[in-house]
């Protein structure tokens, strides 16, 4: 990835985490913040923790981290649904 691509990727990461976190923390459009963070977490997990390419202890570590992220996504999706039902 070229220098511009890396900067854009970092900026998008920071923006998504700050905006999503702010929306969830304040409860203002919390459903949108939860959806942003869930989408980011899925993408980051698939790109950064490719356990299917590892073996031995590295495999176990990456798989454990990926499963932790699945749990986080589950909580964010629950927040998304609860907030969406509450405003609907």
Image: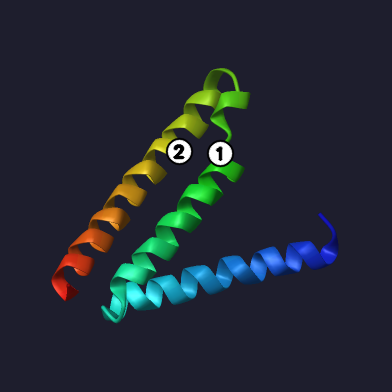
Query: Considering only vertical position in the picture, is 64 above or below 38?
Result: above
Q: Badges 1 and 2: C-beta atoms under 8 Å apart?
A: yes
Name the side, left or right, on which 19 lies relative to 15.
left
Q: Secondary structure at mark 2?
A: helix
Rendered image coloring scheme: rainbow
Q: Residue at x 41, y 56 (%)?
A: 38
Residue 59 lies, in percent from the top left, at: 54, 25
* Quadrant location of the C terminus in the rendered image: bottom left
Query: Considering only vertical position in the picture, is 54 above or below 76?
Result: above
Extreme-top residue of the structure: 56
User: CA gap, disc 1 to disc 2?
Assistant: 6 Å
Name the side, left or right, on which 47 lies relative to 22.
right
For marks 1 and 2 on the same chain, the one whose residue lies earlier in the sequence: 1
Instruction: Kindly identify which residue carries mark 1.
Output: 49
Q: Residue at x 51, y 33 (%)?
A: 62
Query: Considering only vertical position in the picture, is 11 above or below 40?
Result: below
* Quadrant location of the N terminus in the rendered image: bottom right
Query: Considering only vertical position in the picture, is 3 above or below 48?
Result: below
Instruction: Kindly identify which numbered label has been placed on residue 66.
Output: 2
Q: Residue at x 48, y 25 (%)?
A: 60
**How many neighbours does mark 1 have within 10 angstroms: few (below 14), some (14-19), or many (20 or more)?**
some
Instruction: Kindly identify which numbered label has been placed on residue 61.
Output: none
Residue 19 lies, in percent from the top left, at: 46, 76
Q: Residue at x 60, y 44 (%)?
A: 47
Exactly how many numbered labels are in the figure?
2
Q: Secondary structure at mark 1?
A: loop
Residue 69 lies, in percent from the top left, at: 41, 45
Residue 66 or 81: which is nearer the viewer? Answer: 81
**How many neighbours does mark 2 have within 10 angstroms: few (below 14), some (14-19), or many (20 or more)?**
many
Residue 85 or 46: which is nearer the viewer? Answer: 85
């Amino acid at each position: 990835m070229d220098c511009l691509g890396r900067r854009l990727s970092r900026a998008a990461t920071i923006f998504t985490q700050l905006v999503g976190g702010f929306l969830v923390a304040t409860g203002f459009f919390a459903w949108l913040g939860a959806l942003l963070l869930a989408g980011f977490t899925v993408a980051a997990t698939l790109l950064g923790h490719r356990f299917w390419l590892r073996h031995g202890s590295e495999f176990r570590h990456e798989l454990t981290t990926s499963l932790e992220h699945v749990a986080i996504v589950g909580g964010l999706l629950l927040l998304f649904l609860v907030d969406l039902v509450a405003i609907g």
